[in-house]
Image (cartoon, helix red, strand yellow):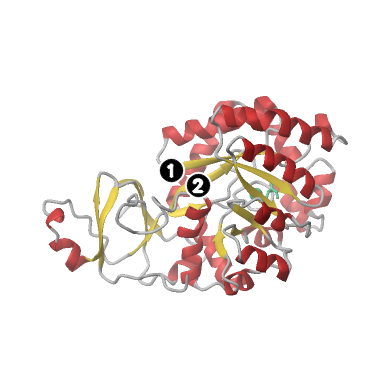
Amino acid sequence: MRDPGLVRDGAVLVRDGNIIAVGTRRRVERLPAARGAKKLDLGGRVVLPGLVDSHTHLIFPASRAAEYEQRIAGATYEEIARKAGGILSTVLSLRRAKPEALKTRALAALRQFAAHGTTTLEAKSGYGLDTKSELATLRLLSELHQEQPIDIHSTFLGAHAVPPEFRGRGGAYVDFLARELVARVALLGLAEFCDVFCDRGAFTVAQARRVLTAGRACGLVPRLHAEQLSRTGAARLAVKLDAASADHLDKINSADIRALAASNVVATLLPGCSFHMGLADYPPARKLLDAAAVVALATDYNPGTSPTLSLPMIMSIACSQMHMSPAEAIAAATINPAYSLRRHARIGSLEVGKYADLAIFDVEDYREIPYYFGVNHCVMTMKRGEIVYSRDGI
Ligand code: NIG
Ligand code: FE
């Protein structure tokens, strides 16, 4: 991860949306296959593989800026959640929202993702929490996947919170998910992954195991919100279940780090949460990297804990607050999340046979991507060889 594989004065040769050659411009331009190719001169800017955001809650109806203000004044995320704010307030407004309004908002967000260099993302349900609204969210995700250029991989997160109609009966809700809804989602082909918010105030390790095992039995690959607010043992569960990813991991201990490092579970860090919530502590990225765990970074784009869709901003936070090197941050926002989405054969790096998914940054040195923070330097994004975003003047 420390070696970005930099090619100076490089070129990428694209045909039918795929990379068919990559290397120095001198070499690529001389290839017989390059004869007659249309040339796009990027003026020496930095070209990265399209960024891969492996943890988002794309579909939600509105911001929770009022809660943000309450937290700034001293209320905690968990206090707000206990008073039916937090996730449940988004659930109530999503259930009331007009489908077209949800779609319009998601389309605007997807354009912004593309404008920040993201070409593939994972998106979770989990603000519906009943059959109708969960299926509607997942159907919307598959519609969006078809209708616009960014690839969307869906995750069923029915176990995000206990919905109001099951208040005080979390066990019964878990039964309903494990016996009914998980299978329904899988049979309809509406998700590839299944996730559980396993934490204090959410679902226990035993409940998470139940939902994820039921999902796995019908082909949904497990992912897990693990050890964000408290250490519960969720990261170890992710290892036992051979989950694609364990996400957050703020509260893991050294035994968890060893277990993750010895596994193929991607440790997906979401430092936008600590940043937005004003916390002093960040997930232990350095320890995970030094133990040789597979580390990814994602935005966790959601209205409660991380309202950003900028992976470059997340990379800035990762470098400055978690001591990741710029090269590590780039690998953690490209090939490693591609692996957690089981798409590493087609995306996540600039290699022959992969999609021509490119993010072009108007900087002279790749280290300037995290270095300049809070400013978007992405000037062009290409998905399978098509320009899907470009800023005036390029
Ligand atoms: O990943 N932790 C649980 N889920 C989200 C927050 C969702 C919300 O507050 O709406 C997260 O941080
Ligand atoms: Fe999340």
Choose top left, top right, bottom left or bottom right for residue 272: bottom right
Q: Which residue shows up at 17% across the image and 68% down it?
A: 26
Image: 118 above or below 321: above
Q: Is mark 1 within 8 Å of ligand 2?
A: no
Q: Is residue 77 above or below residue 166?
A: below
Mark 1 in CB contact with mark 2 (< 8 angstroms): yes
Q: Residues within 10 Å of mark 1 (few under 14, many from 20)?
A: many
Give the numbered dot on residue 121.
2
Q: CA distance from mark 1 to mark 2?
A: 7 Å
Figure quadrant of residue 23: bottom left
Of residues 214 and 9, the one drawn nearer to the viewer in this rendering: 214
Looking at the picture, which amino acid does disc 1 mark? Ile
Q: Quadrant of the C terminus?
A: bottom left
Secondary structure under badge 1? Answer: loop
* Residue occupying image coordinates x 72% and y 30%: 179
Q: Amino acid at mark 2?
A: Leu
Q: Which of 66 and 283 lies nearest the eye of the viewer?
A: 283
Q: How many marks?
A: 2
In this view, the residue farthest toward the right is 168
Rendered location of residue 53, percent (x, y): 51, 52
Using a 10 Å C-alpha cutoff, classify the residue at mark 2 as few (fewer than 14 neighbours), some (14 to 19) or many (20 or more): many
Residue 108 can be seen in this image: yes
**Residue 239 x/y as whole percent:** 66, 56
Locate residue 99, reporting x and y percent: 58, 27
Mark 2 residue element: strand
Residue tagged 1: 150
Which of disc 2 and disc 1 is earlier in sequence? 2
Residue 256 image position (x, y, % from top left): 70, 65
* In the depicted structure, whether residue 33 falls above or below residue 149: below
Q: From the viewer's perspective, is 190 left or right of 358?
A: right
Q: Which numbered disc covers residue 185?
A: none
Residue 283 visible somewhere in the drawing: no
